[in-house]
Image (spheres, rainbow, N blue to C red):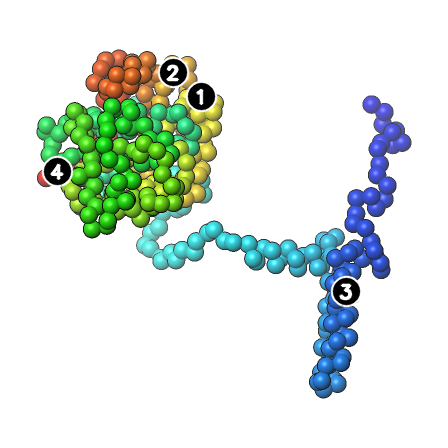
Amino acid sequence: MSADPRDEVQFADGFDVPDRLAFGLAAAELLVVVAAALAAYAILHIPAPRALAVTLALLVACAGAALGWLRVSGRPLVQWVRLAVLFGLRPRRGRIRLQLPQPAPEPVMAFRPTVLRDAPGDAVQPRAARRRDGGAHRVTFFSLKGGTGRTTLAVELAARLAAERGRRATPVALLDLDLRSASVGARLGLHGSSVVEFAAAPPEERRAAELLCRHPSGMQVLIGPQHPPNPEWPVTPAVVRELLRDLDMAGFGLVVIDLPPELTPHTESVLRSVDDVLIVVSPTVTGVHDAYRTTEALRRRGLRHQLRYVVNRQRPAADVSEAMRDLDGQVVAEIPDDTAVLDAEDRHQLAGDGRGPAANALRRFARRISGEISWSWEE
């Protein structure tokens, strides 16, 4: 390419700047100057002491001239005033929080969560569960990407832990709170009431335990609605919190919740009320990208200490260890890609009851979670 400056494409001077109407001013600046001049003229004729009227008129005229002709960083002052007003009127979404001083606070990290990481060769130690007095331990699987297997993992985990009820008296509940596309009922071949019936009942007659249907594994299930309800009513965040509290009072020790792949007021309400958020990761490029996106979205909402990861449909050649190191994330389970899981789903059965690599991994996963929440089974 020729380096001759004559070969370069150049714009004529003034082509990319605002049109000047008069006195070197564009339309907006000229309007402000004229308006200030008219206002100063009107002030001179108001019934007030002459000295006061002249002073006010001079101030208004000077202010108008400054707004029109004064430049700050190449922009007229009137433009900076306009931008400041728009910024001040913009709605605020943040919250002001009062932080009281506490002894020996731990350092807060800007992006990385404070989670435990497994050292190479070390045995995995059960993580201390965050217990709420008199309440069930709550677990949910979440991802902003659909099709990761959240529902399958929720069903398998709840069923495996409920199967141990022969030795433990505390019941297990599985809630399908995916109001947009509920699938727990179809997965298990169950029919019954949903959270919509709970929300539509009079407050004094709401009994969550009466709406649950029992699965042969022993878990009690609240299936999702057959048709998507109004997103704003009757299932509100307050109703969801009441549902969870009602299960606490009914004596449930573990509540597993299936959520949709989106952040709505009701899903955020659940995410803030659970003890464990398990982000489901698909070992693909798009799946790892979603893990980053989901992690960032939840951390921005203050959900740092609960976040852990489950790699679903893991293949021998797939490796997400680098992404987990970057996220400073702890992988609690890797479920291999196994057609036996799909076969079990088609028969409304549990993959964890069968044989194969996925079944073995699901049982190990359930034992780990059971060990972490062993307090839930104490009488």
Q: Which amino acid does label 2 sit on?
A: Arg
Q: Mark 3 points at which residue?
A: 33
Determine which quarter of the picture holds residue 1: top right
Mark sitting earlier along the chain (4/3): 3
Mark sitting earlier along the chain (1/4): 1
Determine whether the residue tagged by mark 2 lies in a helix, strand or loop.
loop
Determine whether the residue tagged by mark 3 lies in a helix, strand or loop.
helix
**From the viewer's perspective, is residue 101 above or below residue 223?**
below
> Disc 2 to disc 4, how far (Cα)?
38 Å
Mark sitting earlier along the chain (2/1): 1
Marks 2/1 in contact by CB < 8 Å: the verdict is no
Marks 4/3 in contact by CB < 8 Å: the verdict is no
Q: Mark 1 points at which residue?
A: 284
Q: Residue at x 44, y 39 (%)?
A: 297
Q: Name the residue under label 4.
A: 378
Determine which quarter of the picture holds residue 280: top left
Q: What residue type is labelled 4?
A: Glu
Mark sitting earlier along the chain (3/1): 3
Determine whether the residue tagged by mark 4 lies in a helix, strand or loop.
loop
Q: Name the residue under label 2.
A: 315
**From the viewer's perspective, is residue 73 above or below residue 304?**
below
Q: Which residue is drawn at 26% across and 16% down?
A: 347
